[in-house]
Amino acid sequence: MVTTKFNQTDIDPVLLKERATTEWKKITLVGRRTPHKVLMDCYMGQCVELYLMQYCEFTNNPNDFYDVLKPDGITEVECKVTEWRDWRAGCRHHLEKKGGLDDRRFGWGYGIADKVYFWSYDKITGDYTFVATATANNDLNRYVLDPHIMI
């Protein structure tokens, strides 16, 4: 079961570095982010993925850029982390920005998971808080934030 909060110190730093740098080397779509910012974003995202795998019985999704599989081993979950103080706005940004999840799934045809888990990251404390979920709505051609967390 997914708990609502964990700290980055709960994650094995060696494994985190390995996964984050491996992902970072594969990324070509960076927008205005510097290479260092892309790497830091990989660290943030991989921290969540490792938490789900190490503590919540999720498994690694072996396909490139597909995050994790639920404990059923079948259902894909996309994980996103926001540093925005207003986490709702941060979640919407991940979905709606140019090149965001809405564009990637519904505009460009990428196989993005039906379910997105959003985490808020506090860079001062190192805490990650599970804040929201979103579900792909094929009728609206966009992701919709769920009215409450739906796992």
Image (tube, rainbow, N blue to C red):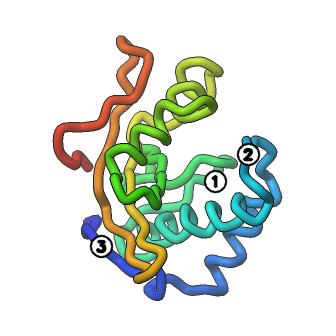
Quarter that holds the N terminus: bottom left
Q: Earlier in the sequence, mark 3 or mark 2?
A: 3
Disc number at residue 32?
2
Q: What amino acid does circle 1 point to?
A: Pro
Mark 1 to mark 2: distance in Å? 28 Å
Residue drawn at point x = 47 percent, y = 52 percent? 79
Disc number at residue 62?
1
Relative to 26, 113 lies left or right: left
Relative to 113, 18 lies left or right: right
Disc number at residue 5?
3
In the image, residue 83 above or below residue 5: above
Mark 1 to mark 3: distance in Å? 25 Å
Which image quadrant for residue 6? bottom left
Residue drawn at point x = 37 percent, y = 14 percent? 140
Q: Are marks 3 and 2 in contact (CB under 8 Å)?
A: no
- Pair 1/2: label in front: 2
Residue 145, position as x, y percentages in the image: 30, 36
Which image quadrant for residue 142? top left
Q: Earlier in the sequence, mark 1 or mark 2?
A: 2
Residue 151, position as x, y percentages in the image: 26, 50
For the residue carrying disc 3, how many other residues have a C-alpha within 10 Å: few (<14), some (14-19), or many (20+)? few
In this view of the protein, which residue sits in the foreground, 62 or 94? Answer: 94
Q: What amino acid does circle 3 point to?
A: Lys
For the residue carrying disc 2, how many other residues have a C-alpha within 10 Å: few (<14), some (14-19), or many (20+)? few
Q: What amino acid does circle 2 point to?
A: Arg
